[in-house]
Amino acid sequence: MSLDATYTREIPLVEGKTSFKEIDDVIARPTETKPNIKWFIAIGISSTALLTGAVCLGLTFWYGIGLWGNNQPVGWAFDIINFVFWIGIGHAGTLISAILFLFRQKWRTGIARFAEGMTIFAVMTAGIFPAIHTGRPWLDGYLVPYPNQHGLWVNFTSPLLWDVFAVSTYFTVSFVFWFIGLIPDFATLRDRTTSGIKKAIYTALSLGWRGSNRHWQHYERVYLILAGLSTPLVLSVHTIVSFDFAVSVIPGWHTTIFPPYFVAGAIFSGFGMVSTVLIIVRKVFDMEHIITVNTLEKMNKILLATGTMVGYAYAMEFFIAWYSGNPIEQFTFINRAFGPYSWAYWIMFSCNVFFPQLFWFKKIRRNIPLTFVLVLLVNVGMWFERYVIIVTSLTRDYLPSSWGMYFPTMYDFGILLGSFGLFFTLVLLFAKTMPVVAMSEIKAVTEGAQPSHKHKHE
Amino acid sequence: MDYIKKQLPDSLTKTGGIMLAVGVLILIMAFIFTPQRAFFDYLWIYLFLVSIGVGSLALVALEYLVGATWSTPFRRITEILASMTPVLIILAIPLFFGMHDLFHWTHAEVVENDAILTAKSPYLNVEFFIARTAFCLLLWVMFYFLLTRNSEKQDLDGDPKFTKRNVTLSTIFAPLFVVTITIAAIDWAMSLEPHWFSTIFGVYYFAGTIVAALAATTYASVKLKEGGYLDKALGNDSFYSLGTLMFGFNVFWAYIAFSQFILIWYADLPEETFWLIHRWEGSWKFVSLALLFFHFVFPFLILVGRNIKTNIQALKWMAPWMLVAHALDLYWLIFPTLFRGNASFGWQELSFPLIVIGLTMVVFKMSANKKNLMAIKDPKMEMGLDFHL
């Protein structure tokens, strides 16, 4: 909650006196006008990246994953790094839309829709990687447990399988949550549009919404229930992703703090990505009075908090590795920080723990260009965190005779680029076809939308 | 607001004093007959009081940090509960005399013949342990005095500058609290089994502490509300939020406990599993199961609905329930070191409820005597009283 300097009243979340019509106009404009040249340039770049990834992926299908840098002992590399990275990005959306909703943080209103959309796209992007890392993606159907003529069953005791369930459940619920939130806005677009085709599409999508009192009552109840369901789900997804590592006995992977540490890291990386995109969006779409500096400042506070939590986990890992008295654990962490991949470790450490500490200062939190630089660093740092965890632990096995190094190939980079291409192409399409801010919700937090009478206590 | 200060009844000091005296008497007898066990009882009592005092202090800081308004009417009660913090300094002294009985790693001859303990001795040694404990306690007490002084000064003139100062103080306190509570967890609970280690342990301990502090605040608030000591405008929706937060942190506790358990169980490394095995041998199995059901399963099912949390009668039962669950949690953490093979609850352990309840009553009354029970001029108070779901 944002309070003014006297701590007696809330600061309005939308700046200036904005009429309801004006809000609709601003938010609906991208869906009602022809895209400008900037948008075409942006989607040109992102779809080129997507196609590059598609080509690399096609070649991988044809020749096999030998094209990648994966080797013995590094059996997991870019494939799993990218999976964890993108799944993590998705978490911010659910945090903003569901958890902050339960915490009654109204400032989420301006950014929730966009963040939710990013969740959907990030999970879609993430889903590609476990599917392709199997090497024979046409057999991935066997991941679904069903009675079959081969008598083949999945390994129910493996967290990799739990991932299949967790991610697909998470995707489904997030999608429903996002769609439910969009219904009133689809109805607004339906009523505003003059094009016959658009009218038909928005009519279908708005599911007969008329904005009656009863509709709103049902809507709000469903929204609350879905928020309650999404909250444990979002925690479970990254918890199970962390189990992929932590249940094994690989030094550097098996440590009990992994579940909350991964969840904090996921939220941290997700906020980094949401901030990165929103800083551009608010500028391009003239939404600076809706997605305000106050909102970005609060996001920066969450980045500071979650980044420091991640730092706490790094410190605990180091301390307990020493405290355990286990020489293999100790070697692993010294190797991370000072071994052949120390450059990756220090990129991770500085981007995730050190630079976010600048957000202690209000001036920096409210400085948009600097925030943009820092959130970009968060994205970089969190990608490298997964690189450090996966690659450094695998290159230094229990048997020094099987130690090795990992060098990614151009196909690895191509597919990574393609994942960014897919994500941003979807984001751009979303921004063109759907309202990126919840029109119905934002009106409730404008100046003058509150009850006009003052409740008196007698 | 129409708050009028009413003194708490003197019976609080009387009943509390009698309970405390009887509890201390039992503890002294325990020291005579079973000194080692008495020190474990003392540690159990001490850690519970840490949860009440320091956990409440963290809640006070949390309100300032996140700018919550709904909790402002309850904050003074949490501050009064946090007044246990200065008492903890005095109570720590007997603990230092019991280190030999409590902590295996203080035995020089054991450490000499144990490579792992020798490796840990730069951290686990008596001097450093005392220094760390002193550091944590002094830091907590310092922030207790700073935060409550500003809050009480505000009762006179309602100047928002005090809120601003406390927001700054709370921001500084937050990371320091995380570090100190982790040290406390490792030193006072984890090092009872000096070979064992778990990176999540600090988070686990923190989660339990916050649940206990929330339960204490909830119980005290409901009792005071019923006795007519608080503003009449304070409605059930505000209590609902307290109940929800308690529910939420309890689920968080369960999540952390489950994470720790499943990772150790799944990896099945003997250097970690022995700690869980000690908690599954003989009758310890039932304590572990009781912890699962009474700390998580039943409270979850009971508190998940909305109606129960707006019902302050129900909260009056659920808050002590959570406090008992926290006591069980601490018992489960501490006593398997002493009672290998089977859990035990003897007359010595009766000192725990008597001292904890008695001392809390006495300290609460003494601290509350000098203060308003609500932060009457806090600028956020009006919004807090006006809170509706």
Image (tube, coloured by chain):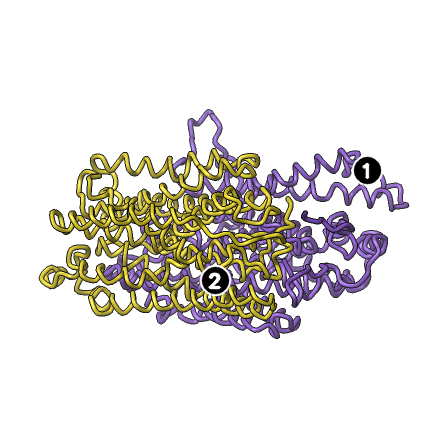
Chain colours: A purple, B yellow
Residue beneath the point at 53% across and 62% down? B65
Q: Circle 1 is placed at which residue position?
A: A203
Q: Which amino acid does label 2 sit on?
A: Pro
Could you give the CA–CA distance between mark 1 and mark 2, rounded to whole angstroms? 48 Å
Return the residue nearer the eye: A448 or A218: A448
Q: Circle 2 is placed at which residue position?
A: A408
Say which of marks 1 and 2 sits in front. 1
Name the spot of residue B265 as percent of width and height, x first: 31, 43
In this view, A442 is above or below B266: below
Q: Is mark 1 on a helix, strand or loop?
A: helix
Res A82 seen here: no
Return the residue nearer the eye: B246 or A161: B246
Other-residue count near label 2 (Cα within 10 Å), few / some / many at <14 / 14–19 / ≥20 = some
For marks 1 and 2 on the same chain, the one whose residue lies earlier in the sequence = 1
Q: Is residue B28 left or right of residue B313?
A: left
Q: What residue type is labelled 1?
A: Thr
Residue beneath the point at 66% across and 71% down? A368
Chain for numbered disc 1: A
Name the spot of residue B299 as percent of width and height, x first: 44, 37
The answer to whether the residues at label 1 and label 2 have Cβ atoms under 8 Å apart is no
Q: Is residue A72 left or right of residue A325?
A: right
